[in-house]
Image (spheres, rainbow, N blue to C red):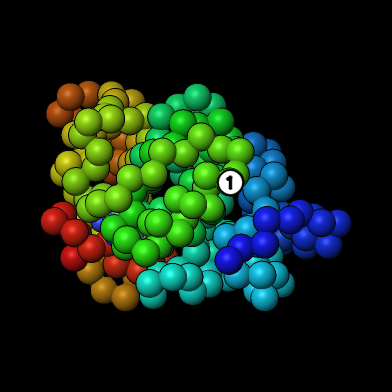
Amino acid sequence: MALLQDTPLTRGLRKQLIKDLQDKGFHDLPILKAFAEVPRHFFLPPIFLQQAYSDVAFPIEAGQTISQPSTVAYQTLLLQLEPRQKVLEIGTGSGYQACILASIGATVYTIERQMKLFNATKALLNNLPYRIICRFGDGTLGLPQEAPFDRILVTAGAPEIPKNLLKQLVIGGKLVIPVGDGETQTMTRVTRLDELTFETEQFQDFRFVPLIGKQGW
Ligand code: SAM
């Protein structure tokens, strides 16, 4: 059960985390503001208070992980998100990344395939002041009934880019997804230029838990 209390101690730990992110080269103000606003310890059991503000990934329910803060910052930066955009996140996990996106001003839809994690995170998000729509299911299929999306963010490692997700982007929309068939995945951004044309860019390598589903592993 998360500790939903923000104290001078946790605010201090958060300031230190933001300094750590700045030292690692993250200077985007809306993103840093979101990290300052969202208490990351809400997403971990209370005994892991210190770990919540270290730049490390951490185990959560169902053998999954809450992504490392610098990975959350990196993926958010690549999204080039603007306030009021409609975003689909695949891999709700702890719900932290979804709250960062919502704190920047996006309307966030998020999908999780692990039932236990989905239920726990949905209950947590209901107690937080963000408008996040949680769905249970296979995110590799996207969310056709709510499409199109301005941005789609995948927070699990995919063997290839799911075609369903590309179809659900607006023209000008962007998909950020780690792609790779081994231990590591290359962070990839796909921009939809028109109905049939997509531009693909590749960035650094990361290690994510696998994206499991019809268009995943
Ligand atoms: N965004 C999360 C956070 O802020 O805590 C981190 C997510 S964790 C690295 C990846 C998540 O993707 C796991 O919770 C996993 O169950 C989920 N996942 C994997 N394949 C999925 C799929 N096809 N659809 C939805 N979720 C999926």
In the figure, residue 109 lies in which quadrant? top left
- What residue sits 44% from the left and 70% below the top? 61
- What residue sits 52% from the left and 47% below the top? 125
In the image, residue 126 sits, relative to residue 210, either above or below, namely: above
**Image quarter for ligand 1:** bottom left
| Residue 188 location (% of width, % of height) | 34, 51
Disc 1 designates what residue? 127
- Quadrant of the snapshot with the N terminus: bottom right
Dot 1 amino acid type? Asn
Camera-side residue: 94 or 128? 128
Q: Is mark 1 within 8 Å of ligand 1?
A: no
Work out which residue is located at the far right of the displayed protein and give it: 8
Visible residue check, residue 28: no
In the displayed structure image, the side of residue 119 where residue 82 appears, left or right: right
- What residue sits 68% from the left and 56% below the top? 4
The residue carrying pointer 1 sits among few (fewer than 14), some (14 to 19) or many (20 or more) residues within 10 Å by Cα, namely few
| Residue 146 location (% of width, % of height) | 28, 30
In the displayed structure image, the side of residue 35 where residue 93 appears, left or right: left
| Residue 83 location (% of width, % of height) | 54, 27
In the image, residue 148 sits, relative to residue 20, either above or below, namely: above
In the displayed structure image, the side of residue 113 where residue 49 appears, left or right: right
Visible residue check, residue 117: yes
- Quadrant of the snapshot with the C terminus: bottom left
| Residue 200 location (% of width, % of height) | 28, 43
Q: Secondary structure at mark 1?
A: loop
Camera-side residue: 187 or 40? 40
- What residue sits 22% from the left and 31% below the top? 145
